[in-house]
Amino acid sequence: MQIDNFKIFADLVETKSFSKSAKINGITQSAVSQQARAMERHFKTLLIDRSQKQFQLTREGQRVYESSKEILHTYEKLLSELQEMKKVISGMIRISTIYSIGLHELPPYIKRFLNDFPSVNVRVEYRRSNLVYEDILHNSVDFGLVAFPVKHRQIESLPFRNDKLVLITHPNHALARQGGEVELKDLAAQRFIGFDPDIPTRKAVDQIFRDNRLEIEPVMEFDNIETVKRAVEIDHGIAIVPQATVLQEAKQGTLATLRFKGREFTRPLAILYRKGRVLTPAMKKFVETLGMDLPEARET
């Protein structure tokens, strides 16, 4: 058996999907099925209970999966140790991130990282927040970047930074002429543009409104920061967004940004990776570039 056999089988078990396992490993769905049957022939036992509608392992399949994870962990640890012995910083880092972080927070860090470690390739995928967690759990990526991180027993979360939330309006909007600050209660009579209800930043904004007894229903809802900004730029309404995402528009004068008088609301960001994951030297250096310490580094 080759190491790839164990990885494909482990990915199949964790995703419970032949198509997702195929995508992760860059092969066809048919190839995943063939690999699973090849393992059954090798071990001379059924590993997948095909009598069930949903994906389910046999008792033997569960044992092979557990051993596969042990084998993969040992193999990844060996590769990482060999790279460290050779002082090699190379390879691929795969990142899954929400749009606002990927477009506005991450670029300077990636630029610095690639300048310091040109032998490393970095691939960034833009995803909705819930799919970032899914990517981490399925080992589709090495790191995830999200806002308002939620605890998960299989995911390690490291604080990245805090974004300040600000109000944005068209430059000629009445609120923009109030000296750079606005009272929360002044939003009640305005047309408000929000993110989709399942997006963490939208949930946080809704909570701000509830805490301050404001009944505000968005007149428009979008799934990404860029569309929200474009709607405000053409004066279709106002919005609350992370300040880092509108620095360019504020500088160019296409949007006005306002602070909340006497109040400050922030959006915590975090980098995620799967617990127990062996981090290569390149991955460790990437975390360092983001200005964070790994848990094991803090304990020593």
Image (spheres, helix red, strand yellow):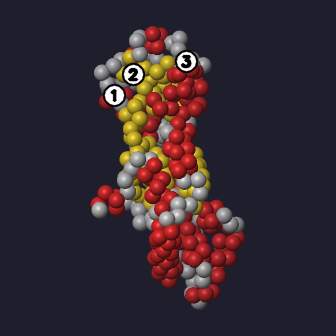
Precedes in sequence: disc 2 or disc 3? 3
Whole-Å distance between the Cαs marked 3 and 1?
A: 23 Å
The disc placed on residue 264 is: 1
Three-letter residue code for mark 3: Gly
Precedes in sequence: disc 1 or disc 2? 2
Crowding at mark 1 (Cα within 10 Å: few <14, some 14-19, many 20+): few
Three-letter residue code for mark 1: Glu
Vertical placement of residue 171 versus 59, above or below: above
Dot in front, 3 or 1: 3
In contact (CB < 8 Å): disc 1 and disc 2: yes
Whether residue 236 can be seen here: no
The disc placed on residue 191 is: none
Name the residue: 45% across, 29% down: 243
Vertical placement of residue 286 versus 27, above or below: above
Check disc 2 and report the residue beneath it: 259
Whole-Å distance between the Cαs marked 2 and 3?
A: 16 Å
Q: Position of residue 173 (x, y in %)?
A: 51, 12
Name the residue: 36% across, 17% down: 183
Name the residue: 52% across, 22% down: 250
Q: Position of residue 44 (x, y in %)?
A: 59, 89
Question: In the image, 220: left or right of 265?
Answer: right
Question: Closest to the observer: 282 or 116?
Answer: 116
The local secondary structure at tag 3 comes to loop
Crowding at mark 2 (Cα within 10 Å: few <14, some 14-19, many 20+): many
Question: Closest to the observer: 127 or 251?
Answer: 251
The quadrant in which residue 41 appears is: bottom right
The local secondary structure at tag 1 comes to loop
Question: Closest to the observer: 88 or 58?
Answer: 88
Whether residue 4 can be seen here: yes
Check disc 3 and report the residue beneath it: 253
